[in-house]
Amino acid sequence: RGRGPAAQAAARLAPLVRAGPRGGHFALRMLVVPCFVEAAVAAGRTAEARAAAGEYAVWAAYGVDGAAPALLARCRALLARSEGGGEDGEAAHWFGEAVRRHDGCGNDFERARTLLAYGTWLRLRRRPGAARGPLRDALVTFERAAADGWA
């Protein structure tokens, strides 16, 4: 398992996404899953992230939260990225789907988080030119929201 901030975040969030009597309330679990998936993937806890995303997919299908399909697509992109993503294929597909779905749901902060993850992935794939747009757009949104920790 990984160390550092991602591992700490995953460890703190894990009890909240766990189902059952020692887990978090269902509504809270669904709010926390996207954050947990991001932290768990970064910490190397991919199996746990995949299980949480699977439960989230069932909930997202109900259509109660307009942002859920975009957040689910981001979770799938992060999972695909952690597993290699078929040399750009699967991860790129899910990042594109996440950004497209964010465009219609009005949650600019989560859209910026998706753009940050996408831009970071592009940079890691040695595609700095393609990364500039998503990273710039994420930065502008974080600055507009006074989210200094993200900017």
Image (cartoon, helix red, strand yellow):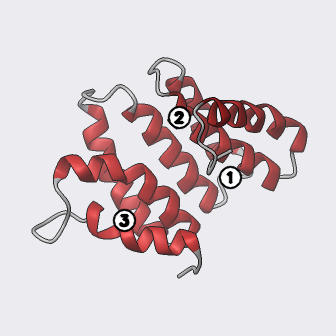
The earlier-in-sequence mark between 1 and 3 is 3
Few, some or many C-alpha atoms within 10 Å of disc 1 (few <14, some 14-19, many ≥20)?
few
Residue 17 relative to residue 6: left or right: left
- Going by the image, does 56 lie left or right of 76? left
Q: Position of residue 72 (x, y in %)?
A: 43, 41
In the rendered structure, which disc, 2 or 1, sits on the residue that comes first in sequence? 1
First-in-chain label (3 vs 2): 3
Rendered position, 25 above or below 45:
above
Instruction: Kindly indicate whether the residue at mark 1 contacts the one at mark 2 (C-beta within 8 angstroms).
Output: no
Query: Which mark's residue is nearer the viewer, 1 or 3?
Result: 3
Residue tagged 1? 86
Image check: 76 left or right of 136?
left
Q: Position of residue 56 (x, y in %)?
A: 32, 47
Residue 92 figure quarter: top right
Q: Dot 2: what SS?
A: helix
- What residue type is disc 1 on? Gly
Q: Secondary structure at mark 3?
A: helix
When asked about the image quadrant of residue 71, the answer is top left
Say what secondary structure mark 1 lies in: loop
Front in this rendered view, residue 61 or 14: 14
Circle on res. 144: none
From the image, tell me which residue sits under label 2. 109
